[in-house]
Image (cartoon, rainbow, N blue to C red):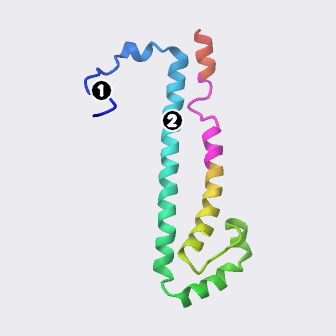
Amino acid sequence: MSAVSQDAPPLSRRARTARGPAGAVAARVLRGGRVLTATFGYLFAVYSFIQPVGYRGTYPARPDRLIFARDFGGNTGLRLFYGEPHGLLTVAGYSAWRVGGTLAIAAAAFGLVATAPSPANTGITETVARAR
C-alpha cells in the first residue's frame, strides 16, 4: 500500500497562494536548495565511481601501481590538493586519497554556494516585507 493517497486532488491555485508571501518565499528557497543538493550529490557520486574504475583500468598490475606510487606519491603539488597519500598500491587507498581530498574541497565549495544569496533572490525578502 502506498504512503501517498492516489485519490488526493492536486492543490488549487488558491490553496497554493493561501500560504502567503512568506510561504511562497520559503517554498522557492526549498525548491532551489533541493535542486542544488541533488546536482552536487550526483556529481559526487559520478566522481566517486569514476576514480576507482579509472585507476583499476589504467594500472591493472602491481608493477604499474609501484611506478605510479613512486611518481605521484612524492609530488608536493599533489599533496597540497589531495593530502598525504596512503596505500596507493590498492584501489581503495588510491580512491580514498583522490576522492577524499577532492570532495572535501568540493563540499566546502558546495557549502559556500548553498549559503550565498543568489541574484534571483536578492531583494525578495524586502519585497515581501513591504507587501505586508
Instruction: In the rendered view, tell whether residue 63 sits above or below residue 109.
Output: below
**Residue 26 relative to residue 105: left or right:** left
Tell me what residue is drawn at x 48 percent, y 15 percent: 19
Indicate which disc residue 52 carries: none
Kindly identify which numbered label has been placed on residue 32: 2
Compared to 127, does 92 lie above or below?
below
Badge 1 is on which residue?
Answer: 5
- Considering only vertical position in the picture, is 120 above or below 126? below
Q: CA distance from mark 1 to mark 2?
A: 26 Å
In reply to whether residue 96 is colored magenta, the answer given is no
Query: Seen from this angle, which residue lies furthest left?
Result: 7
The crowd level at tag 2 (other Cα within 10 Å; few <14, some 14-19, many 20+) is few
Q: Where does the image place residue 30, in percent across and percent down from the top left?
A: 52, 32
Q: Quadrant of residue 128?
A: top right
5 above or below 61? Answer: above
The x and y percentages for residue 51 are 51, 69
* Residue plotted at (52% across, 44% down): 37
Disc 1: CA contacts within 10 A as few (<14), some (14-19) or many (>=20) = few
Give the mark, 1 or 2, whose residue is nearer the N terminus: 1
> Looking at the image, which residue sits at the far top?
132
For the N terminus, give its image quadrant.
top left
Q: Is residue 94 left or right of residue 58?
A: right
Between residues 77 and 45, which one lies in front from this camera angle? 45
Q: Quadrant of the C terminus?
A: top right
Under tag 2, what secondary structure?
helix
At x 52%, y 19%, the residue is 23
- The span shown in magenta is 110-124
- Identity, as a three-letter code, of the amino acid under mark 2: Gly
Q: Nearer the viewer, mark 1 or mark 2?
A: 1
The kind of secondary structure element at disc 1 is loop
Check disc 1 and give the amino acid type. Answer: Ser
Q: Nearer the viewer, residue 25 or 48?
A: 48
